[in-house]
Amino acid sequence: MIKGQAIFPANRHALYEQHGYSAAIQSGDLLFISGQVGSSEDGSPEPDFKRQVELAFENLQAVLAAAGCTLADIVDVTSFHTDPENQFATIMAVKAQIFNQRPYPNWTALGVNWLAGFDFEIKVIARIPGQV
């Protein structure tokens, strides 16, 4: 059995401690990243939706970097949206800036009715370069 190793970004936000979870778990050559939201370091939600999505991606990139990964190492994405129909255009615009080259990761988007005060959350699985 492979044991997982907890990974945290350098400036980990308060939500990890408040809710008792790891930013990511490395298991072999895979990195399982917990849902990242558009929060400030104190864990509070960004009120502007576009900026909240951008911050979620910034937080995601910080966790990836802590494990020696980049966006190019992502193989699976799941995103959660509180109002997908009205948020879709904004999310797609930010996504197009982040993932602007093929091949794109596979992606599953889910509409939800609660994200603890947030409106967007993204979780990913990445392959860690150079790991066996």
Image (tube, rainbow, N blue to C red):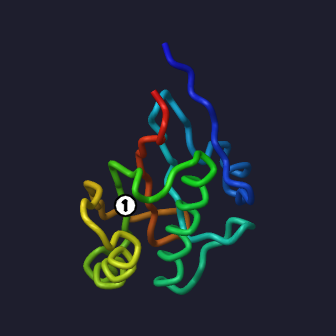
- Residue 68 spot, x, y in % from top left: 57, 48
**Horizontal arrangement in the rendering, residue 53 relative to residue 65 (left or right):** left
State the image coordinates of residue 47 (x, y, percent, origin top left): 57, 83
Q: Is residue 76 above or below residue 48?
A: above
Residue at the image position 67 percent from the left and 43 percent from the top:
20
Residue at (54% x, 53% y) in the render: 64
Nearer-the-camera pick, 88 or 2: 2
| Label 1 crowd bin: few (<14), some (14–19), many (20+), radius 10 Å | some
Closer-to-camera residue (39/61) = 61
| Residue furthest top as drawn | 1
Instruction: State the image coordinates of residue 31 (x, y, percent, origin top left).
Output: 48, 40
Name the residue located 62 percent from the left edge and 31 percent from the top edge.
5
Q: Quadrant of residue 85?
A: bottom left
The residue identified by callout 1 is 79
For image coordinates 55% across by 37% down, the residue present is: 25
Quadrant showing the C terminus? top left
Dot 1 lies on which element? strand
Q: Residue furthest front?
A: 130
Residue 95: x and y, percent?
A: 36, 74
Identified by mark 1, the residue type is Ser
**Circle count:** 1
